[in-house]
Amino acid sequence: MHRISMLAGALLMAGVLSAQEWKPESTEWYYPAPPVVKPGKTLGQPPSDAVVLFDGKDLSQWVSVNDEEAKWKVVNGEMIVVPGTGGVKTKAYFGDCQLHIEFKSPPAEKYNGQGRGNSGVFLQSRYEVQILDGDNNHTYVNGMVGSIYKQSAPSANAYTRNGEWQVYDIYWKAPRFGTAGVLEEPARITVTLNGILIQNNYVVKGHTPYVGLPEYHAHGRLPLMLQDHGTAVAFRNIWIRNL
Ligand code: MG
């Protein structure tokens, strides 16, 4: 809140200023001015303050989850999971952020359910937004594409067709922990898939295990992680804004 409105509020509480004496400028503030951020040339391209994590060229921003060289491949501007090589994570660490990431499922072929095009976006390496083929693919809804894995089903299936690029925009508020590691504020997440709101300020219950219940364990900034779940999911145009 700016000092003008704070002053007006203080005067109001002190009985110096009655509500009838409010002026338009009593509730207007000018500082601090938000920074100028220039949008990308077309929708979905990185804005001027984004950290570009993959622009089609190389894996220079990534390492394997074991802190070795990232073993996924880059083909025709796409970063593709090499099944069995493990997940990859960013060299940079993140807290609150806005993430843009595009993915494409491999050909559906014979696989179904969790076996078809499974990967995942792990915010702070722990909290998964599921990546899965959502084209006529039957599975548990809190594990379908757009779910917060095993916590929250998406409010819509906004996936288009197998073989087409899918666009996630994720807005992440990291959990807050006190000095003794006690959870003070859970994480919150908002997700759009192909521009359609599918998770609206969801309060995250904890990490997102395959077996068991979500829990929080204190942590600070951590890498963004992408999952190897055994299928050759492709990625492109990955960027993030620190908030
Ligand atoms: Mg997954």
Image (tube, grey):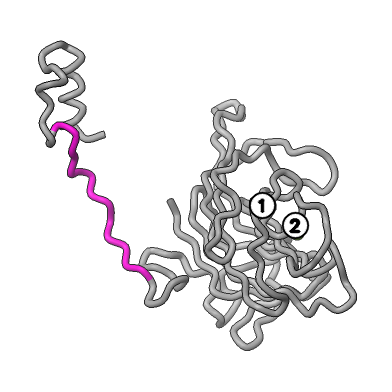
Circle 1: residue type: Pro
Asked if the stretch drawn in magenta spans residue 37, the answer is yes
Badge 2 residue CB within 8 Å of ligand 1: no
On residue 205, which mark appears? none
Mark 1 near mark 2, Cβ–Cβ under 8 Å?
yes
In the rendered view, tell whether residue 151 sits above or below residue 22. Answer: below
**Residue occupying image coordinates x 53% and y 61%:** 169
Crowd band around label 2 with a 10 angstrom C-alpha radius: few (<14), some (14–19), many (20+):
many
Taking the image as shown, residue 47 lies to the left or right of residue 215, namely left
Is 22 positioned to the left or the right of 143 in the image?
left
| Residue identifier under label 1 | 154
User: Which residue is at 73% across, 50% downward?
Assistant: 149
Task: Looking at the picture, tell me which residue is in the foreground, 164 or 175.
Answer: 164
* Residue range corresponding to the magenta coloring: 26-39
Residue drawn at point x = 11 percent, y = 17 percent: 17
Residue 45, x across and y down, in percent: 45, 73
Task: State which tag comes first along the sequence, 1 or 2.
Answer: 2
Quarter of the image for residue 133 reads: bottom right
Q: Which residue is mark 2?
A: 144
* Image coordinates for residue 179, horizontal then vertical, percent: 55, 28
